[in-house]
Image (spheres, rainbow, N blue to C red):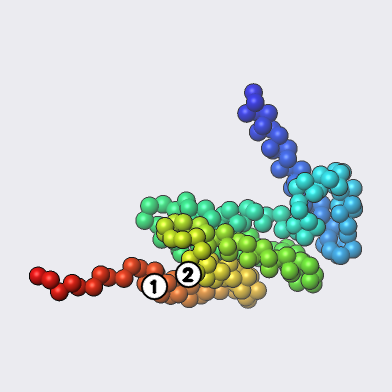
Amino acid sequence: MTEVLLGRRERKKAATREKIARTALRLFLERGYDAVGIREVAAEADVAVTTVFSHFSSKEALVFELDDDFEQRLRRAVTDREPGEELLPRLEREIQALIRHCTADGTAPFWRMIDESPALRDYEKSMRLRHAESLAVAIAADLNLPLDTTSCRIIARFVIDAFSVSREAPEPEAAVAEVFQMIEAAWQVALRSLAPEPRAQSGIG
């Protein structure tokens, strides 16, 4: 019974979060991001202001409802690979899936709203940095390397930037493939630098 109640509570919580985010986005797109306040969002969603902030840390976070989901998807692309499955092809598939989601028909007004708002642009930039750091930690752990390994952080940053650069390209999916060819080349160089140095010959016998 307890598990049923907890499951129901979590579903209700997720539904409330989605309702708030959906309402906020509709108002932002209709009236402009800067013209809508948190109180208006709460009133339109029929929740208290405190409820909005229990689900979202800031007004900017309302726009990026899937922030945590995207971050976890990228981490799982590293941690949930099949035995023998290569890292970069799996990450490329995830970025391609994200690109298809974020460039689908009807998404142009969303990105135009972000491009026109300094606050949203700054938030998106900080979000990308956080995603890159999270991905770098996952990659380093997967390779049994120190979590602050520079090569892992650089490759993770390249992967996140692949999304940002490709989203703005005329053919986003083709751009992802092109960028990942360059990432693969950089990754091979990084792997060579991370490989242990061969032991020097002792010259004995």
Residue drawn at x 18%, y 72% is 202
Does 198 appear above or below 77?
below
Judged from this view, the residue extending furthest toward the top is: 1
Mark 2 or mark 1, earlier in chain: 2
Q: Relative to 119, does residue 19 appear above or below in the rendering?
A: above
Q: Nearer the viewer, residue 19 or 71?
A: 71
Q: Which residue occupies 56% across, 74% down?
A: 175
- The residue nearer to you, when weighing 53 against 193, is 193
Q: Crowdedness of circle 2 by 10 Å Cα count: few (<14), some, many (20+)?
A: some
Q: Give the Cα distance between marks 2 and 1.
A: 9 Å
- Residue topped by disc 2: 151
Quadrant where the N terminus sits is top right
- Please state if 182 lies on the left or on the right of 109 as rendered: left
Image coords of residue 38 (percent x, y): 86, 54
Q: Which residue is mark 1?
A: 193
The three-letter amino acid code for the residue at tag 1 is Ser
Q: Are marks 2 and 1 in contact (CB under 8 Å)?
A: yes
| Element carrying mark 2 | helix
- Left or right of residue 140: residue 53: right
Q: Position of residue 189 (x, y in %)?
A: 41, 75
Tell me if residue 104 can be seen: no
